[in-house]
Structures are given as structure tokens and as C-alpha cells.
Amino acid sequence: MRSIKDYADIVGKETIEEIEKLGSYLSGKIIQNINSTPVGGGVAEILSRMVPLLKEVGVDARWDFIKGGEKFFEITKKIHNSLHGVEENISDDDFKHFLDVTEENLKEINLLGDIIFIHDPQPIGLIKAKDKNGFKEKKFIWRCHIDLSSANPKTFNFLKKFIEKYDYSVFSSPLFAKKLKIPQILISPSIDPLSDKNKDLPVETINEVLSRFKIDPERNIITQVSRFDRLKDPLGVIDVYRLVKKYVDCQLILAGGAAADDPEATEVYNEVIEKAGGDKDIFVLNLPPVSNIEINALQRASTVVLQKSIKEGFGLTVSEGLWKSKPVIASAVGGIPLQITHKYSGLLSRTIEGTALYVKQVLQNPSYAKQLGENGHNHVKHNFLITRHLRDYILLFLKTGYTQMQDTVYL
Ligand code: UDP
């Protein structure tokens, strides 16, 4: 079993001791995380590591999920897209169904936390419980993982009524914050360097995964890992690959899977298969929900990692690629520019043609690729590892939960 102490080799003993000390101040308090899926996507990825680590430093952290049927998740996906600025038709009936499912969850979920930590819009309505007797002492935090800067006003105003009832809100980037009546805290996401997704792998494991999928380790590999979602632009990635292939030999991996709260995945997967058109050098991998070693191996085997998103929250896959010292070429959207300084720790692009040009450049210039990857690794090490995130969360919980600590603990 991995221990918090194992991270000392990466971030230093003092950092770990400080986290353990801060965690001890929360002893006896229950922190209840609630989101909408145990697997698939960045929120589940973070919680699956954050909750055990919080427990290890003495915090009674829990993780629960709301329930909803197909119609509910179709609506929440439309809400998600429209918060990213995509045109969606969300009817009054949709909003009503969202509220009805919220009421059902309010009856079913035991809100036992001292701090109720709600992630993203799907469970946002659970804040209605705050007015109940006995709940006034609890603190409610809304953690937003989405870039709200171009949110559809109608959708945002619907959610704002809930958001402003929370005690605190948390955003991943200052650019995502909105004008709100409640305090907004900035905490960027993170990756776990010791998880199966990111730990070092023996070369035999990497080769075994490549051979399982019949990918040639001797030829260039361009990879994008993402849920099959239009906002991740997998079709655009195929266009990029086809442009690059005119000049440099390469293979393309589109590795993805479904998330329990994402009903569009099958449709998008089918569109990708159709566009790939049987090209033997395009590997469209629809992976089972927990395929961490496979994804780790595919990222490590890549010559270039892409994240050609049209819209993005933070984009954990960018940090995952950079941590593996890969040259990452990604769209300048959402939280990606926090992770990549253009031409220093990766490359930022906006178009298919621009992305293809950078991929070609990097494939033709291995020493430049190596330099970008090394700079990217260091940037992630200093900014986007789970130990920093863990410390930020503990400080946030202390600030919201313990009035006597407020003079001494600042974010
Ligand atoms: N991921 C995965 N399997 C997949 C697709 C994605 O494990 O088939 C992981 C990926 O490695 C990353 C997370 O899911 O850790 C996606 O997070 P990101 O912030 O990039 O995007 P989101 O899906 O939250 O929009």
C-alpha cells in the first residue's frame, strides 16, 4: 500500500509533515464529497486519490454520488455543454426534471458531513438541505470544475440561485470565476504522481500494452486520451493526424471511454470510428472505466501527446502527459494555458492546421521535443501535484469549519 510518506521523495519531507500537521487539526470532522459518477472524467480521477489521502492524514473524508436516470444525465450533459458556451436547447421541462431528481436525491442521501463538498452542477441542488433544522451548523462548499467564462446566461442564472446559497465556491482558474455574492477560492486541480495512471512503469509493461493493441513501438505515436466527447474534438484530432501524415510517418491513438454521467459517448465514439475509416494506423480504443495502467503506458509510449479540446475545464490529461516528460500540444482553452507556457513547457494552438504544424515540428526535432517535455515535467512538479492540492483543500476546510483557526490559517 502506498503511503503519504512516499511522496516525500518527490516533494520533500517538510511538505508531507506540514500536510500531516494541518490534517490533524481536522480530526473528528467529516468531509463529505458528493459528485455524480465514481469513474470517468477528471473529477472522479481526483476524488479517487484525494479521499484516501485525506483519510491517511486523519481527515474523515467520504465520497458519495447522486443518482439519476438517463433523462437526468442527458439534461446535465446539456447543462455542462451550455456552461461551456455551447448552444443547447434546455426546456422548462428539463429544468423541472433536474429539480425533481434533486428532490429525490435529497430524500436518499444522508448528508452527514460537517462540511458538504459538492462537485460540479449535477448535485448542486443539494444545497436546499441547508435550511433544514440541524443543518445550519454544516458548511457547504461548491467546487466548480468547469470554465464558466462563456456560460450561457440562462443556464448560469438557473444555477446561480443555488451557488449563492453555499458558504464558499471553488474555481480552478481566476479566469473561470463569476460575479457572486459568496467568497470564491482559487484551487487548481492536480495529478497523483504515484497513482497507477502516473507512476513510473517498466518498459516491459509499456511494450506489453502496445503489443496488446498491436501498436508499433518503433514508429511515431500521437496520442489523445479523452472521454468520447465533442468538446474534446476527436474528429479534429484525426484531421491533424492526416495532415501530419503527409509529411511524417505516424500512428494515432485516440484512447477514451465512457463516464456514467455522460450519455453522448457512444454516439461520438461511432462518429470517430466512421471518420477513422478503417485506417490501420488509427487506434480508437474504447477502454473499460478503470484502465489506468493502460493509459499510463500509452501516454509513456507516445512521441507527442495532444489535447485538442474546443472547451476544457482544467484538462488533467495535459498534466499527465507533461509529468511523463512528453511534448504536449494542446488548445489554448480553459485551464490548459495554466499548464503550458507556449514554446517553453509545451505548445498551444487554436486550429487544426496550427496543431498539425506543431506536431510535425516536434516529430522532426526530437531535442526540441525533449526540452519541452522536461520543462513541462518541472512545471507540473511545482504546481499540479496532489500534495499541493491536498494542502489547499485542508486549508480550505479549516477556514470554513473552524472559526478559531481563521486568524492563523490563510489560503
Ligand atoms: N481518462 C480515463 N479513461 C478514459 C478517458 C479519460 O481514465 O478513457 C482519464 C484521463 O486520464 C484523466 C481524466 O480521465 O485523468 C480526464 O480528465 P480531464 O480533466 O482531462 O477531462 P474531463 O473528462 O474531466 O473533461
Image: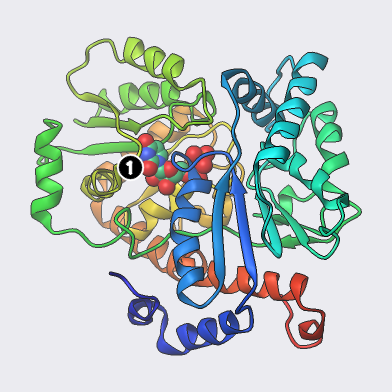
Measured as percent of width and height from the top left, residue 260 is found at 48, 31
Q: Residue at x 54, y 53 (%)?
A: 63
The disc labelled 1 sits on which kind of residue? Val
Q: Residue 216's image quarter? A: top left
Q: Residue 183's image quarter? A: bottom right
Measured as percent of width and height from the top left, residue 288 is found at 30, 33
Q: Quadrant of the C terminus?
A: bottom right
Measured as percent of width and height from the top left, residue 198 is found at 32, 57
How many residues crowd around disc 1 within 10 Å: few (fewer than 14), some, or many (20 or more)? Answer: few
In the image shown, does 321 or 248 lie closer to the viewer?
Answer: 321
In-image side of 315 versus 184 (left or right): left
In-image side of 343 versus 109 (left or right): left
In-image side of 6 versus 302 (left or right): right
Q: Residue at x 85, y 27 (%)?
A: 154
SS of the residue at dot 1? loop
Q: Quadrant of the N terminus?
A: bottom left
Q: Which residue is mark 1?
A: 290
Vertical placement of residue 18 versus 119, above or below? below
Q: Residue furthest right?
A: 181
In the image shown, does 227 or 35 lie closer to the viewer?
Answer: 35
Q: Residue at x 59, y 83 (%)?
A: 22
Vertical placement of residue 211 versus 408, above or below? above
Q: Is mark 1 within 8 Å of ligand 1?
A: yes
**Ligand 1 falls in which quarter?**
top left
Vertical placement of residue 37 versus 74, above or below? below
In the image shown, does 281 or 344 lie closer to the viewer?
Answer: 281
Vertical placement of residue 225 versus 230, above or below? below
For residue 306, say whether it is visible: no
Measured as percent of width and height from the top left, residue 88 is found at 70, 18
